[in-house]
Image (tube, rainbow, N blue to C red):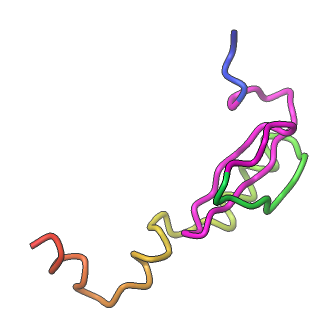
Amino acid sequence: MSNPFEQSDRSYSVLVNDEGQHSLWPTGTAVPAGWHTALADRPREECLAYVETHWTDMRPRSLAAAPAGASAAANG
């Protein structure tokens, strides 16, 4: 059985969580708690292009918003 998250011939949605992280999700699969749909029922390639355009900073929103040096001090 193939992975439903990597099939180029089916429709997907782009999900986004509160931290601004994006995920491709097969259409018809329940959206997990903590995520909302940003783009629905589109071809996989269109969803990938959306993610590339809209998720330009891979850091979680809370980390990106932290004052400079805050993460270094916490790890230090």
- How many tags in the picture? 0
Q: List the single residue furthest toward the bottom.
A: 67
Q: Is residue 71 magenta?
A: no
Quadrant the N terminus occupies: top right
In this view, which residue lies farthest toward the top? 1
Q: Examine the rendered structure and indicate whether residue 32 appears above or below residue 17.
A: above
Q: Position of residue 10 (x, y in %)?
A: 86, 30
Q: Is residue 55 left or right of residue 40?
A: left
Left or right side of 46 for 15: left
Q: Quadrant of residue 11?
A: top right
Q: Which residue is the extreme one toward the right?
A: 41
Rendered view: 76 above or below 9: below
Which residue is at the front of the view, 49 or 3? Answer: 3
Tell me the magenta residue range.
5-32
Q: Residue at x 80, y 48 (%)?
A: 13
Q: Is residue 30 magenta?
A: yes
63 with respect to 9 (left or right): left
- Residue 55, position as x, y percentages in the image: 61, 65
Instruction: Identify the residue at image location x=70%, y=45%.
Output: 24
- At 57% across and 61% down in the image, what residue appears? 21
Asked which quadrant contains residue 64, the reply is: bottom left
Quick check: 57 above or below 6?
A: below
- Position of residue 17 measured from the top left corner of the image (x, y, whole percent): 62, 63
Residue found farthest to the left = 76
* The C terminus: image quadrant: bottom left
Q: Which residue shows up at 78% across the image and 37% down it?
A: 26
Residue nearest the observer in this picture, 72 or 53: 72
